[in-house]
Each structure stands twice: as structure tokens, then as C-alpha cells.
Amino acid sequence: MGSDKNQQPDRREFMRRLGGAAAYGVPVFVALGTARPASSAEPSPESNPERIAMHWEEAARHLISAERLGARMEFTERDWEIMAPAVKGLTPPIKRWPPDWCAIC
Amino acid sequence: MARTYRLDVDLSRRAADRLHAGFARAGWSPTDEDDWDLFWGQGAPDPEAFISLGRGRRFNHFPGFAAFGHKGQLHRNLSAARDRLRHPDFYRFHPRSYSVPEDYDRWRVEADAGPPRLWIVKPPRGGQGQGISLVADPDEVPREGGWVVQEYLDRPHLIDGRKYVLRVWVLVASLDPLICHLHTNGVFKMTSTLFTSDPTSVDDLTIHLTNPSVQAAHPDVPLGSLNSDLHAYRRRLTEEGIDELALFGRIRDVVAQAVIACRDSALRQSRRVSTRLEGCFELLGPDILIDEDLEPWVLELNTFPSLEVSKEAEAEAAAVVRAAKDEMVADVASFCSLDAGEFPPSVGGFELLWPGSDADRFSRCFPLLRPRDRALAGRMCPAISSIEPFLSPKSSIEAHPVGEGLALREPHSGRMYALDSIGSAVWLCLADGLSPAAAIDELAAAFPDEPIRRIADDVWDLLSMWMEYGLLTALDSPGPDQGPESFLEKEGKHGIGQEPTARSA
């Protein structure tokens, strides 16, 4: 994952770019859940930070886009069906959605 | 000129009768035209109905009413509040509940590990006992279909050896700020068959469910002997030497906690449909079970409380229940005659539940006391500080750039959260020590065409969620760059919005 709070964007620069780049929309906040292995066959994501970072980033992007499509904050199986159009656009490195080791998927 | 109301054509005739009677008592006139002042809807309303709700008009639902009425959502809201507070005096009044299929595995582990017990299986929506069953064998619980499995409370307080449930009425007059009233009357509903918790009794619902529609199936017991109003119930308790005043104080306490637990979810869901909620209100019908220790349990909140009076009821009992419902409907109509934003301490039998003079007790039930809540509660209860807390990201939270925004990670639990670019901007403001009001100002400067009130509401929704998820901490003193100006001061400065005003009864 590599990055940490020290790499947090500069607020003023972030706000300047934000105002110039995007139309205002309701802020989206999505709980991704807890990453943990679902079975012993899967490596713990904590032991593979690069992998969890990739999953995390993809999940963040796609859940937010799904939220914009009208899905709710708390996801049920039905929500995943609704989100399918966004999720199908997912590209490697995650080849299958959801990854086996993700507790929320 | 008399105000007019229009009833949804889907309402049953008996429910419509009670509404007509109640509204007539309050001086309202029915109409079938589109010039109504109040529309009383049945069933899930079309979102368009809220968007087109004109100024000065009333509608008997909020768009986010499911936060109260959907059994799974109620359970989630109450569980979240209990987990957040972790206080023995709060949120101990709801039976353990599980939404199937998502909670099935967790429930099954508990069901298999513990001693044999009864479970009550409910559909997520619906009323009058429809679709409800009791099961003793965990294998009989469906794995699919959105059912809610609830621990069966098998030690109820009994009257004449029978189980009973109290239906009370709550009027939610506003979601932001939250304003709600509890009616002094309600309906007492008893079963027809003597109570037993023997597992072999599960198929006889006349032992376990108090719904009149279920009890009507009993061949021998006249339904009228089973129902009454809360005044009669209180008299009966007094005759038995029970301190009914103390019991109803506890009922008031748990109902207030339950409504507050659902408020933020209802508000967020509502704002996704419409930002204009001034004309909306919600009549809730909480079902309260009293256990043998005389402690109240909130079973459901019910967003479509029955207004019907059973045709099978005996004349005398039916008259009592009918009068209670007519009185309550007339009180709702009287409330709707007030100007939007006006809230007296009582309207007929509806007495203020939140914010009352004891608002300091319940203020902790909110994930975050929003500015309008704080301003109103502070006027009703001097113990509520008018000073907004300073909100700061917890020091343990890691924030990582992801795409156009941030992702957050709480390292102790491993939980992760994603923020879009606007949410990230708010986070960065708080991380830099800005107050919520200053963060709203920064966003308003970035989006000058956007109404600041909308930005402010969105930011407070976000902050409330972050408090729910334990990502923020509230500080008594300002962070390095946080000034003393409150959100409402800022809102006043910008000349937008007025919070409701209190007036004498």
C-alpha cells in the first residue's frame, strides 16, 4: 500500500482543483468492510499489502460509481445485482468479483 | 376556509372511516380534487409525490420512512446505536434480531449453541401479523427472502394469564431538527389463549400474537374482550398495585431512544428523494411488549399503524378503541393545522417526546447533535450546550489517496472506507483543524453556484455518518484552526433557513 497520512493531499490545492474540475454532488461515503481471509486457502490480505491495496482502490472506485448509479449505502445481494453494470467494468488485477477473501463481498 | 384532506384510494373503508371521523372533529373537509392541503397515503409513496409537494401542503410520510418501518432497517439502526453507545442504560430494549440471508450464519451459530428457544420469523414489511410464524426448530427458518428472525421474548407480563402488546402512537413532525410527540393514549391488544412458552405451542398463534386479525381466528373468545385503550390498561395496573406512572416513563424512554436511532438514516434516505421535507410528517405505531419484570421492549415502530376497528369487536370495546383512534387522528389533524415549523409542547394528546426538558438524557443517542437539533434542544433544556463540539478525525485513522479521493482505514478493526472527491475535501478540512462551519464555507467557495444550505446539510449528513462509524472524535475545545462560530450563526449570516420556533401550548 505504501502510502500513508504523510501523503495526504494538500487541502488548499485539493479544494482549488475540486472547484475547477467537478460539479457539486452529494458527497459519497462507502463502508467497504473489513478485509480478512474467508478461508485458510487464501492468503491473508494483511500479509499481502500490495494485493489489498489494489482491491481497496478498485473497490473504492467501483462502489462510489455504483453509489452514483443509485445503489444504497448498505449493500445486500440485491444491491450487488443493481451494481453489476459498474462491477462488470472491473479490470484486472482483480479477476473475479468479489475476491474470495473480502468479507464484505 | 376549512382545510381539506384527500385519502389514498387504497385505504380500507374502515381505516378511511376513522380518518374521516378524526379530521371532521378537527374541522377539516374531505376532497377528491387536487386542491388538498393534506394527502393521507397508504403504501410506499411514489418519490414524485414528495418532489412535487407544494409549500404549505402536508403528506403523511417522509421519503425515508422505511428507516423506521422496515424491520431489518429498524434492527440495524438500533444495533448500531447500541454498539456505538455501549451503555447499560441505552438500547437494551430490542430483541436480538437477524436479517436473513445476510445474518443467517451468525444467527445459526447462536441458535445451535444456546439452549433450545423459540424464534419469531417476520417478513420485512407488512402488518397485522401477516406472514409471521414462530419456530422452535432452526431448520425451519428460511435462508432467503429478506426475513427477519427475532428472539422470542418468552417471559411477558400477563393480564389474566394472557400475553399482551401495547400500541402507542408517535408523531414525527420534523426530521431536521428532530421533533416528535408521543400520544398519551393507544391501544391495548391481548391474546385470546392462555400463555405458554412450551415449544409445542408454536402453531397456535392465538397464544403468541396479539394482532386482532390473528385473534379473530379464535372460535370462542369474543374479540371485543381482548382490546381496549391505554387508559383502561393503566387503571388495571393500578388495581394490581403496579406503578403505572413509572412504567409509562420507561416506555417513553425506550420509544424516544428508538426514534432517535432511526432519525439519521431516515433523513439521509429522505434527502436522496427530496430536499424539501417541510410538509412531511410520519405517524408511527410502536408495538411495546412488557416483560414480567415490567420492562418495556420495542418490537416494531410501524409506519402504517392500523386505524381500523375490527368489525368483530363487541360494541363496548370497539367504541373505546374507536374513540382512541378518532381522538388521535383529530390530534394529527390539529397538528397539521399549525404552520410548518411551529411545534407546541403538546397537540391534543400528543406530548413532546424530543426535544423535551430532559433532552440532555437523550442527546447522547444521536451520533451527532446537528446544529438545528442543538439549537432547539438547547432552548428546551438548559443542560444542552449551545456550543457545537469540534470534530476531528481520530488519530488512528489512516487516510490514503485513491483516485480522485481518499480511502480511510481504521487499523485496529481493519475496516476500510471510501470517500469521493467532495467527501475527501471535507475530511481534509477536518484533518487540517477546520470547524464544520469552516469546511462548509470552503466547499461553498469551491461551488459558488450551489446553495450553501444544501452543502451544509450534505456535510452534516456526512459528519453524522463518520461519527456513527467511529471515525471522528468530538472535542470540547477547538483544534488549532477551529474558530468559535457555530453553523447556525453562519447559516443566519448567510440569511438562509430558520429553525422551528417553540410556542406555548
Image: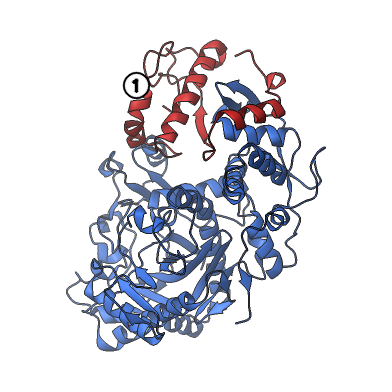
Chain colours: A red, B blue
Q: How many marks?
A: 1
In the displayed structure, B157 sits above or below B311; it is above
Task: Using a 10 Å C-alpha cutoff, classify the residue at mark 1 as few (fewer than 14 neighbours), some (14 to 19) or many (20 or more).
Answer: few
Q: B32 or B206, which is in the foreground?
A: B32
Residue B80 coordinates in the image, percent (x, y): 53, 46
Residue B163 visible somewhere in the drawing = no
Location of the N terminus of chain A (image quadrant): top right
Residue B18 visible, this orientation: yes
The residue closer to the viewer here, B309 or B179, is B179
Residue B223: x percent and y percent? Answer: 25, 78
**Mark 1 belongs to which subunit?**
A
Q: Nearer the viewer, residue B320 or B359?
A: B359
In the orientation shown, which residue stands out farthest toward the front?
Answer: B449
> Would you place residue B186 above or below residue B468 in this image?
below
Question: In the displayed structure, does residue B480 sit left or right of residue B106?
Answer: right
Question: Which picture quadrant has residue A8?
Answer: top right
- Residue A70 horizontal side relative to residue B438, left or right: left
Q: Residue B16's quadrant in the figure?
A: bottom left
Q: Name which residue lies at 26% across and 66% down.
A: B206
